[in-house]
Amino acid sequence: MKNDDTNKEEEKYLQTKESIINNLHDQKEIEKKYLKTAGSLLDYWIKELRSADTQNKKRHNQLLELIHRERSNIKKIGEDIDRTNIMIDRTEQSLERIRQMINSFRNER
């Protein structure tokens, strides 16, 4: 009976973990879409600034500098998302190996 309870509890954890992983992957896709949209908006503003005949070159250059800085931030955020996903995938692989070893241990009993 205790073994059945343990298996049910383990299954509950595994299902919850799987649900969370699926949500994380969905969230990653949403974050990537956001970053792409923000990048497109920055591209639009750069084109607008380049085509503008401006009297105030200093302000114009400050805006371009600000846009380029934000583009760099967006790139870093994207890289952080990728790194986080790599770490989650590695953790998933480790958990699966541990699960296999636990199952092997159970079968030896």
Image: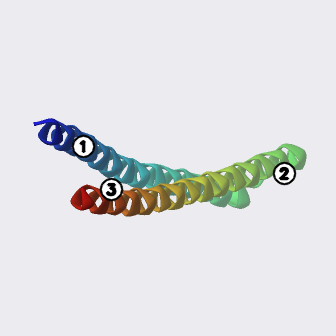
In x, y percent, where is residue 59? 84, 43
Task: Please tell me which residue lies in front, 18 or 51.
Answer: 18
Amino acid on which disc 3 is placed: Ile
Secondary structure state at the residue bearing disc 3: helix
Residue carrying label 1: 10
Mark 1 touching mark 3, by CB under 8 A?
A: no
Q: Position of residue 99 (x, y in %)?
A: 33, 57
Image vertical order of residue 18 relative to residue 50, above or below: above
Instruction: State the SS at label 1.
Output: helix
Q: SS class of the residue under badge 2? A: helix
Q: In whole angstroms, how far apart are the C-alphas of marks 1 and 3?
A: 11 Å
What amino acid is at disc 1? Glu
Query: For the residue marked with disc 2, what is the amino acid?
Result: Asn
Above-or-below relation of 105 to 15:
below
Residue 102 image label: 3
Left of 62 or right of it: where is 16?
Answer: left
Residue 18 place in picture, x, y as percent: 28, 50
Q: Quadrant of residue 20?
A: top left
The C terminus appears in which quarter of the rendering? bottom left
Residue 61's label in the rendered image is: 2
Q: Residue at x 45, y 60 (%)?
A: 94
Q: Residues within 10 Å of mark 2 (few under 14, many from 20)?
A: few
- For disc 1, the neighbor class at 10 Å (few under 14, some 14 to 19, many from 20) is few
